[in-house]
Structure formats: C-alpha cells, structure tokens
Amino acid sequence: MTTDFQEQYERTSEQVLAELGATLGSVNPTELERLADEILNAEQVFFVGVGRVMLALQCVCKRLAHLGVRAHYVGEITEPAITERDLLIVGSGSGGSLFPLGIAKKARETVNCKIAHIGSNPNSDMREIADFMVRIPVRTKNYLPDEIDSCQPMTSLFEQSVLLLGDILAKMIIERKHLEMRSLWQYHANLE
C-alpha cells in the first residue's frame, strides 16, 4: 500500500466518522423517544423506503425482529396486513420519494395506523401524513440551508445515519425492556 493511499484512507475515515458524530448528535432525543414508544406500543411495525434507504431500514427491521418485535418491510413476500394498531416507519430523506409517500398516504387513508417519518426535510409532503418525524438533518437532494453537509456522495450520510440510529434505538430498547443479550439469539435465523 502506498503512503498516499494510507493517508487518504485515514483522512477520509476521520471525515466520515466526524460527519456521523455530528449527525447523530443533532438528532432530537425527544423524537427518538417517541419512536421507541410507538414501536413498543404497536402490534406490528412496518418499514418502507427505496434504494439504499430501504436497505438501511431492512437492517433496522431485522434488528427489531431480533428483539421480539413483529417487524416487516413493505413488499416482502410474507408481508401481513397492516391495521390501525400498527406503526408504519417511512424512511425518506427528502420526504418526497414517490413510493414511500404513496404507501404512507394509503396507510393513512385505509387503516389510519400511526406513521413515523425518518427524514431530513421537515416541510415535505410527509408533514401532512405522518404523526411525527425523527429528523436526521443531513444533506439531501434538496440541499436545505440547515442540513449538515457531507464529503460523501449523494445521500450516503443519511443512509448510514438511519442504520446507526436504528442500532442505537435497538440498544436503548434492550435496556428499557431489561433484555438479556444472550436471550436474543432465540429470534435469530438458525437455518444458516
């Protein structure tokens, strides 16, 4: 490995970690507490997003399933019906992505379940649909003036933050419910 590459790697790693630290530090704990409460009060939790946001949400969905939460992502082959006793978590940085927005509208109109928006834009179309928002104020395609900028391409910082925030939330739920870590393996896939 060349010295230049090593220095570039170290510099880039420091930048990315600093961005993640600033971002996670900017999330409102009250909003996150509401999300934790709604997850624990729901019979089932559904996730919807697109692209890399959906991948991050699928990781969060899986982790919640490891905690015994009945968690699903919209479109999975075994997706059950959503009811008014459930929670839909919509991940969209801009709040304007067509598919998540459409699913949120349908959920509001057909079953009137609780809807949480995880995003960056507090003034998006999701504002009229969601019951509440967990804001991750990072750069999106909207380039809002109060968004945290990033050296990374496109919305990488948002997607990374969704994943890490989900893992942080899972850890906090474990502590709140006094779950024993070893007991969580009962929910882990075992056909591997």
Image (tube, helix red, strand yellow):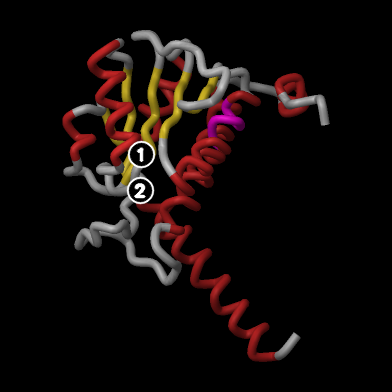
Determine if residue 144 is in view: yes
Which residue has dot 2 on it? 136
Name the residue type under label 2.
Ile
Residues in magenta, as a range: 60-64
Looking at the image, which residue is at 35% across and 48% down? 136
Q: Secondary structure at mark 1?
A: strand
Tell me, yes or no, whether the two marked residues, 1 and 2, touch with CB atoms within 8 Å. Answer: yes
Characterize the magenta stretch by its predominant secondary structure: helix
Q: Quadrant of the C terminus?
A: top right
Q: In terms of sequence position, does the residue under pointer 1 or pointer 2 come before the other?
A: 1
Q: Secondary structure at mark 2?
A: loop
Determine if residue 28 is in view: no
Name the residue type under label 1.
Ile
Task: Determine whether, in the image, residue 135 is placed left or right of residue 123.
Answer: right
| Whole-percent x, y for residue 44 in the image | 48, 15
| Whole-percent x, y for residue 50 in the image | 42, 42
